[in-house]
Image: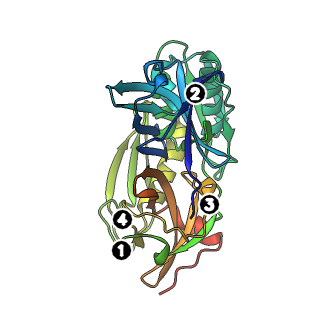
Amino acid sequence: MKLEPAAFGVHTFDGVQLGAIETPKTFTWSRERNEVSRLQLTAPMQDLGAEITPWLHWVSCWHGQSLQWIGPVQETTRDRTGMSVDCRDVSTFMWRTRTQTTRRWSGMDVAPIAADLWAEMLTLHSVRADPIVLPARTDSRYDFEVKSDLKMLHQDMDALSKMGLRWTVAKGRPVLGEQPVAPVAELSEHDLSGGAMIRRSGAKTSNDVRVQGKNSAVTGRTPLVGLHLQSIMSLDDLGGATNIETAAAQYVNRRSAIRDELVIPTSATLSPDAPIELNQLIPGVHLVVSALGLRTVLRLDQVTVTGGAEGTSVAVRLATPDVLTDLEKAGAQVQT
């Protein structure tokens, strides 16, 4: 993976330019799965440093001609010689927005529900970034209800996340739902720094899961070589018998398998020759990775781009997908 040089522009939310941050000394920006992402940079002191105002001004990060990150400034510091800027992506507005509507959804995938709530939040803050809703990958459907001004929006998103909502922000746009199962690229251990490991763990395994919701509880069970490993999952915000039954089926499916997992160090960086582009590194996508005689699929949970005097690096955090069998059907075969 070869990156074009980074450039940083400062502007208002509606695009009025303040200027460019010249000759940054260091910078870091990320994309996260179900988390607010961040951009931080330091630079020599320059005229616009005294003008940058949190929330009013945004920073855009470009690599070559491609926008890669954008979000509102949260904090700046400066002295006679230098300045620093700390930003978050648009999901940070969930902590500055009360739920804007009173509404009930029935029998729906969680991603379109989240998109409706996000759209109202972005309209309130005059942010032009229509949510991207990915096609549902399962038949799981839920009933969900919100009331205007009763909660902050991040609390409603937390409740939807417990029902399976996955989201990220890429290039300023929210992406809601599970990414397709088809891997976007194939990597070998030579494409990643650090040493891979194979782990076979039963620390979180249970095949008899009781899900306790708001008004009732359901137990989901699946056979596992004669074992009866029990657990309880509390979902206090989840109501409705159908919702709880669906959640129980999902949890027991995720927790009942014991498998070999390929573990890549959290500090792993991509080599300059890795066969993948920065635009493909969206949290939630899947990658085929081969190492230690195991060829399997991993999910991208985080990408972090860091630049400084020694150059630019791209770090990735990879994890085993929740339901590996679906991914194996997409073409990834486990080999020894």
- What's the mark number on residue 123? none
In front of the other: label 2 or label 3?
Answer: 2
What residue type is disc 4 on?
Pro
Spatial separation of the CA atoms under disc 4 and disc 3: 20 Å
Q: Which residue is mark 4?
A: 265
Q: Which residue is mark 1?
A: 195
* Sequence order check, earlier mark of 4 and 2: 2
Q: Is residue 288 above or below residue 181?
A: below
**Place of residue 166 in the rendered image (x, y in percent of width and height, measured from the top left):** 54, 44
Q: Which residue is mark 3?
A: 277
Q: Is residue 111 above or below residue 64?
A: above
Find numbered disc 3 in the image and state the secondary structure of the residue it sits on: loop
* Sequence order check, earlier mark of 2 and 3: 2
Q: Which residue is mark 2?
A: 19
Callout 3 touching callout 1 (CB < 8 Å): no
Spatial separation of the CA atoms under disc 4 and disc 2: 38 Å
Find numbered disc 4 in the image and state the secondary structure of the residue it sits on: loop
